[in-house]
Amino acid sequence: MQIRNTLSRWGVVSQTLHWLIVILIITQFVLAETEHDMPLGLAKFAILARHKSIGITILILAILRLLWRWMNPVPPLPDTLKPYERVLAHVSHFGLYFFLFAQPITGWILSSASNFPVSYFGWFTLPNLVAPDKHFAAIVHEVHEWLFNILVAFAVLHIAAALKHHFVLKDDVLRRMLPQVPKTPR
Amino acid sequence: MRRAIAGFLFLSLCTAIVLAGGEAPNAAPAATTPAAAPATPASGGATFTVDPAKSWVGFTAKQSGGDVDGRFDKFTAAIAFSDANLAASRFDVQIDTKSVNTQDDNRDSVLRDKDLFDSSKFPTAHFVTSAFTRKAAGQYEATGKLTIRDVTREVHLPFTFQTTQEGGKPVAWLKGGVGLNRLDYGVGQGDWKDTSVAENPVRVKFELRLLPK
């Protein structure tokens, strides 16, 4: 089991961070949709609090991920890519990293502007980033939701590309982000 | 040397006049915003008008682990207070529970709703003192009855009272706070009896800028 990245594969740490963040983002979406349809009350506030704690978890994991990426080799894009595909790949990767930061931070700002200090699972409370302001909170709420829509578009592109590599181009782009299966040729 | 002593005496005299002016006894109680002022306190306690622009009554509650500050935008406070005459001193504060403001409309509507303040049924929270004790210079404790919803309980409220000069005018600052359990007052029916989202302890606090009448 390879802990660090090599030029041909993502290591265990990178893979774990990648898939953990995928699971947490899906969880965030489910929580947000559930909360959205609930009547005002205790359960709604409880779900929102959980959504915020998980959001901060994603922010922490995103920081770790970038640090790890910076300290490790990054498997290069395949040589077979056309120039516009390389650009598309870089833009979508950059975009996805951007959202890993932008979503938690806009959520944190939204919480601060709504005078809901963000508590991390009740263990500690984060400082407010801005002063309470209802008008500003409404704007940030819109931004937070729209950013998610754009994130989904980027994720769809990312998934489509990964599947194309695996099933059409039959290269190892998807496989190198998956646990190594014995006897499978790389 | 003699001039210095004369100057000191003059300054002391001025200070004494100012301090005396700051606590000049008066008859009628003070009220901030619209509502009628409650009962007139006995003579002897200096009465004050609350400066609504610089005074507030609020609270800090814990929601999902984080401190949430809120205020009541509408309240009236009849304040008669004199260190020299604690027996005649009296606070009578009425708070409009519908005016609760935590800077979030959703949360405020939940607070006004029947499980918490139930503002349509219990529009006013009321605090009225019955006795005062001096704890230290400028520090006191008021004993009084606090009514929230339909529950009245005795509360011991520590506070400070300081007279000062602002813009050449005598002003007094009354500041204090006390910890309560919201469930003791029935603020938390149904789902809200649960304290995992909104914790039971709440700190009520206030700062009043008082102008002598």
Image: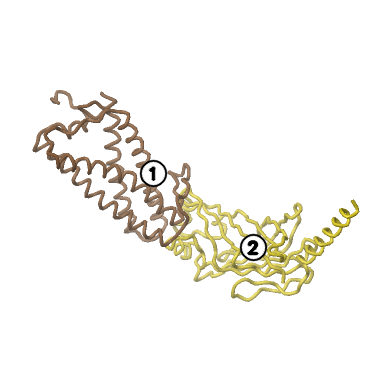
Chain colours: A brown, B yellow
- In the displayed structure, B166 sits above or below A98; it is below
- In the displayed structure, A132 sits above or below A16; it is below
CA separation in Å, label 1 and label 2: 38 Å
The residue depicted at 19 percent of the width and 41 percent of the height is A89
The residue depicted at 45 percent of the width and 50 percent of the height is A129
Judging from the image, what secondary structure is the residue with disc 1 in?
helix
Image quadrant in which you'd find residue B155: bottom right
Instruction: Identify the mark at residue B143; answer none if there is no mark.
Output: none
Q: Amino acid at mark 1?
A: Ile
Q: Is residue B49 left or right of residue A148?
A: right
- In the displayed structure, A110 sits above or below A76; it is below
Q: Position of residue A67 (x, y in %)?
A: 34, 33
Q: Residues within 10 Å of mark 1 (few under 14, many from 20)?
A: many
Question: Is label 1 on the same chain as label 2?
Answer: no
Judging from the image, what secondary structure is the residue with disc 2 in?
strand
Identify residue for label 2: B208
Q: Is residue B86 left or right of residue A45?
A: right
Q: Amino acid at mark 2?
A: Leu
Looking at this view, is B125 or A140 the one in front? A140
In which quadrant will I find the C terminus of chain B?
bottom right
The residue depicted at 46 percent of the width and 63 percent of the height is B108
Looking at this view, is B140 or A112 the one in front? A112
Identify residue for label 1: A56
- Most extreme residue toward the left is A168
- Most extreme residue toward the right is B2
Q: Are marks 1 and 2 in contact (CB under 8 Å)?
A: no
Q: Position of residue A1 (x, y in %)?
A: 25, 23
Looking at this view, is B83 or A96 the one in front? A96
